[in-house]
Image (cartoon, rainbow, N blue to C red):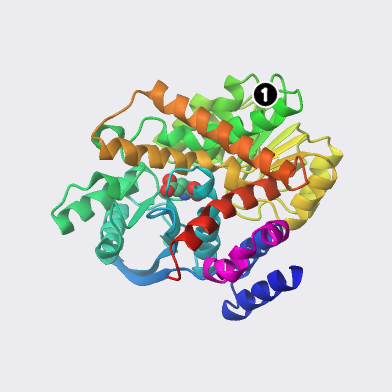
């Protein structure tokens, strides 16, 4: 079986050269599937994997826009429908200069299994642009979003493909994208995008959901070992949506969060992060982490070294792919880290993951640990379809249940396949089996 999987991986590398992130994401999944293919020969016979690694469709388009000085810019837009066996393509849009086809494909591939784990009948997709929103005015962001949607609108829809946010895309961008979709289609199709503002179809708790969910997943892993977050020292990388609400939930559960970061450096705040201030800096001022330090002089900004040098019991990488490498993992382990849960997508390199597992550190892979965001997007679609808006308590209760179920399914699957505690294996297999069964049922398409 290993030969068969190796062959698929080699084919992926050959057909998709110069796409290292995509190859890495595929390798990480294939690496854990051998035992499931031994049990389910029908998946091999039906060519499930060969079909899974090839996106169903890929759309690449030009996004021209004009800045406030009248200068014309051109960016590249992407939307990839990776697999729709379980439901319409679902996944965010990322606006960041690092975006390229490899990044979007790795994210779309991950999304298939993540979305499958939520059990909410959503397929996997992803999109975005190499547009850099940093320093751009609201009017520039609006013009960019309108141009992006003008090329995209024909390819999305409530039952086809439902984009949402990711890095660089939040409520503001979703608003502009939705406005242009409505204008172009002459339809108020609320369920075409998620992450909408709560007064026109958004779900309460969507903003908090990914970060909250990551901490809930970490808490479930810890509970299984008879431990909890109370008084534990936590380091969270990033300072976007995911990081901010991971910090908030960790603090609600009694943990002591001492650091966060952005691309300019990391902030160490021994007294405990002031979330209200961080939200003010990032969400209201759209500032940088240095602005937090200006308002809170006891905190220190570090532009050299790694945030993972800070000793902690719980590490929550919530920034971006491959941000936590082998060297960082060694430092964390030497400093006694007990739990790592991925709030971002693929933030730990394969070598780092291996080290955490070998050190018996609890490791929650992003597919499972950050699924709370997309799960709450599916709850938003449910509310849109029924023209309801649930109170925050109901949305949170659902999120808590979903994260507990994902944890349970990953833990049980890992145990069933002989590797109790291996959440990477549990998440990959549980996510894969659900989508693979749907692919087999629906014939060769
Ligand atoms: N971008 C998020 C993720 O990586 C959320 C996607 C969504 O809500 O559709 O899962």
Q: Residue 216: horizontal and vertical position, in percent?
A: 59, 30
Is 252 in the magenta?
no
Q: In which quadrant of the rendered image does the C terminus lie?
A: bottom left
Give the side of residue 442 with respect to residue 174, left or right: right
User: Which residues fall within the magenta stretch?
Assistant: 33-52
- Name of the residue lying farthest toward the bottom: 14
Secondary element at image label 1: strand
Q: Residue 287: horizontal and vertical position, in percent?
A: 46, 41
Crowd class of label 1 (few under 14; some 14 to 19; many from 20; radius 10 Å): many
Identify the residue position indicated by label 1 in the image.
256
Q: Residue 442: horizontal and vertical position, in percent?
A: 43, 62
For the question of whether residue 262 can be seen, the reply is no
Q: In which quadrant of the rendered image does the N terminus lie?
A: bottom right
What is the quadrant of residue 78 in the picture? bottom left
- Name of the residue lying farthest toward the left: 186
Give the side of residue 400 with respect to residue 332, left or right: left
> Closest to the observer: 231 or 358?
358
Which residue is drawn at the image coordinates 61% and 34% (left, top)? 217
Which residue is drawn at the image coordinates 55% and 56% (left, top)? 110
For the question of whether residue 183 can be seen, the reply is yes
Figure check: 215 above or below 365: above
Which residue is drawn at the image coordinates 65% and 73% (left, top)? 8
Is 47 in the magenta?
yes
């Amino acid at each position: 079986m290993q030969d068969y999987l190796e062959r698929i991986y080699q084919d992926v590398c050959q057909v998709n050269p110069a796409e290292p992130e995509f190859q890495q994401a595929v390798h990480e999944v294939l690496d854990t599937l051998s035992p499931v293919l031994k049990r389910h020969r029908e998946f091999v016979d039906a060519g499930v994997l060969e079909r899974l690694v090839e996106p169903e469709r890929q759309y690449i388009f030009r996004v021209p826009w004009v800045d406030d000085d009248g200068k014309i810019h051109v960016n590249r837009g992407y939307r990839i429908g990776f697999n729709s066996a379980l439901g319409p393509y679902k996944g965010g849009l990322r606006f960041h200069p690092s975006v390229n086809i490899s990044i979007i494909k790795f994210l779309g591939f991950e999304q298939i299994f993540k979305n499958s784990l939520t059990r909410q009948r959503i397929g996997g997709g992803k999109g975005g642009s190499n547009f850099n929103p940093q320093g751009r005015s609201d009017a520039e962001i609006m013009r960019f979003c309108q141009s992006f949607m003008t090329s995209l609108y024909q390819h999305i829809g409530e039952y086809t493909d439902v984009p949402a946010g990711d890095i660089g895309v939040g409520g503001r961008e979703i608003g502009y994208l939705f406005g242009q979709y409505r204008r172009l289609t002459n339809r108020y199709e609320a369920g075409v995008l998620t992450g909408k503002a709560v007064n026109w179809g958004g779900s309460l708790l969507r903003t908090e959901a990914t970060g909250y969910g990551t901490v809930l997943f970490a808490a479930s892993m810890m509970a299984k070992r008879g431990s909890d977050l109370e008084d534990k020292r936590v380091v969270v990388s990033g300072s976007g949506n995911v990081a901010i609400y991971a910090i908030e939930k960790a603090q609600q559960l009694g943990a002591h969060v001492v650091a966060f970061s952005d691309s300019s450096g990391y902030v160490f705040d021994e007294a405990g992060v002031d979330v209200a201030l961080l939200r003010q800096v990032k969400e209201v001022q759209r500032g940088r982490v240095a602005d937090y330090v200006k308002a809170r002089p006891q905190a220190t900004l570090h532009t050299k070294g790694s945030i993972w040098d800070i000793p902690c019991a719980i590490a929550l990488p919530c920034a971006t792919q491959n941000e936590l490498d082998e060297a960082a993992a060694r430092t964390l382990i030497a400093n006694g880290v007990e739990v790592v849960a991925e709030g971002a997508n693929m933030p730990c390199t394969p070598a780092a993951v291996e080290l955490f597992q070998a050190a018996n550190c609890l490791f929650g892979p992003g597919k499972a640990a950050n699924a709370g965001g997309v799960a709450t997007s599916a709850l938003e679609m449910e509310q849109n379809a029924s023209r309801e808006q649930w109170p925050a308590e109901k949305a949170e209760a659902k999120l808590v249940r979903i994260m507990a179920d994902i944890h349970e399914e990953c833990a049980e699957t890992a145990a069933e396949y002989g590797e109790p505690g291996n959440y990477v294996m549990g998440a990959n297999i549980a996510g894969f089996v659900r989508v693979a069964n749907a692919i087999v049922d629906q014939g060769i398409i």
